[in-house]
Amino acid sequence: MLTTASSVAAIVALAWGAVLAWLAIGAALQRALLQRRFDARTRPKLAGRRVLIMRPCAGDEPGLLDNLVSTAALETQARVTLVMMVDAADDGARPVIEAALARLRAAGLEARFELHPPTGPNRKASMLAAVLDGDADAHELVVNVDSNVDLDGYPLDEVIAPLLDEGERVGASWAPWSERRTQPGLGPRASEAVLGASLTAFPLLCGIYSYGLVGKIWAARREALDACEFAGLTHYLGEDLEMARRLRERGWGIVAAPVLARARGGDPSFAQVVDRLGRWMLAVRGQRPLLLPTYPLFFFATPLALALAGFGLVARPLLAAIAAGLIVFARVVVAIAAQYWSARNIGPLRALFEAVLGDVALGLAWVRALTRREVAWRGHKLRVGPGGRLSSAD
């Protein structure tokens, strides 16, 4: 009986390893093809186009002032208006925004501060919806950039350009980002391993998930945002997931613009990193539940598949060894490809270390998302209910 089970385990591990190797090579190739197609596109002229940039803030996070001021150093031909906002008068980000305003205006940028009390449990989406409601139709193009993104020298026009393609009905575009580690601890390294050396790394993932939407930095046509009824997104934890679903449902296309953005990393503990990843996965559980099994199957499959291959060594040692080789090969390919497209230093030993650390963090986050429905965000407790509906748990 044990021999039979071990033989089956070896065969399954071999098949799993083959799929992982195919996925790793395919993801790397698709990412390269995305870049080639993007680089070959005809760039429309953006001179004179009115663009609204929204930067929602919450708390005085590290580097906030520099991140906000960096908006003045964007590379763009468009006429930009910047709105920075918080949802409470005593928010720690408010004095930082006021300090940034003076420097931004001195640099010649049209910028303002807005205060918008929350109208729904997703406070970020609530602020964005309020700004859009107050802006009416003054700007034809709208951009969201989270507060921890450094925009110094960032080519914004490359992200906006797909929206103006007359041959396609593109409603939104989004840019992949990598996290710049600023601290030496285990938590920052785990975050870097997941976001810069795994299949979850957006600079790699955008090659196979360009039709989705990642909410850290995106651009959209105003009429597309109106069509997806943005105010309703405040009732979802993953407002970007719901925004993408509504856009596709209403006939708008979504594209990934592979122009790497940089987010400033903080100094979270390992547990906080797991909580953050678990929050993202909980949004998937609530809003795209069929995608949840893909995490152990593909995103942190390596330790699970290797354990299966290890059991297969009892009855089919050669088959199990080949399976283990494929599994490790696939994970190293993913790590190196993610490092490359994240503009990080590449190294096989570093890739192996980050593969182990990243898979452990992802596995723990997945278990957390399966076992809990409550999350904490910026000091507020939230609960994800049936259908992904979000409610306050404070």
Image (cartoon, grey):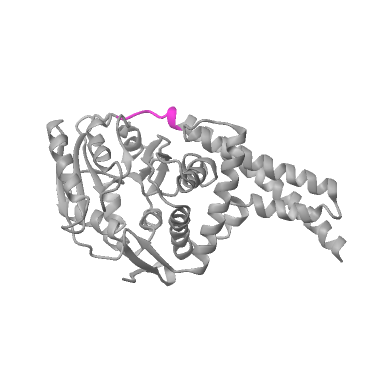
Residue lying farthest to the front in this orientation: 185
Q: How many marks?
A: 0
Q: Quadrant of the N terminus?
A: bottom right
Which residue shows up at 22% across the image and 36% down it?
69
Q: In the figure, 71 relative to 218: above or below?
A: above
Which residue shows up at 52% across the image and 66% down it?
370
User: Could you tell me residue 171's position as x and y percent?
Assistant: 34, 46
Q: Quadrant of the C terminus?
A: bottom left
User: Could you tell me residue 251's position as x and y percent?
Assistant: 38, 52
Q: Say whether residue 314 is magenta.
A: no
Q: Say whether residue 39 is magenta.
A: yes
Which residue shows up at 38% across the image and 69% down it?
383
Q: Is residue 202 visible?
A: yes
User: Could you tell me residue 32's position as x and y percent?
Assistant: 53, 32
Q: Main secondary structure of the magenta part?
A: loop
Which residue shows up at 79% across the image and 53% down it?
10
Q: In the figure, 330 relative to 360: above or below?
A: above
Which one is in front, 44 or 211?
211
What's the magenta region? 38-44
Q: Is residue 25 visible?
A: no
Which one is in front, 120 or 252?
120
Picture quadrant of residue 170: top left
User: Could you tell me residue 288's position as x and y percent?
Assistant: 48, 61
Picture quadrant of residue 64: top left
Q: Is residue 162 left or right of residue 358?
A: left
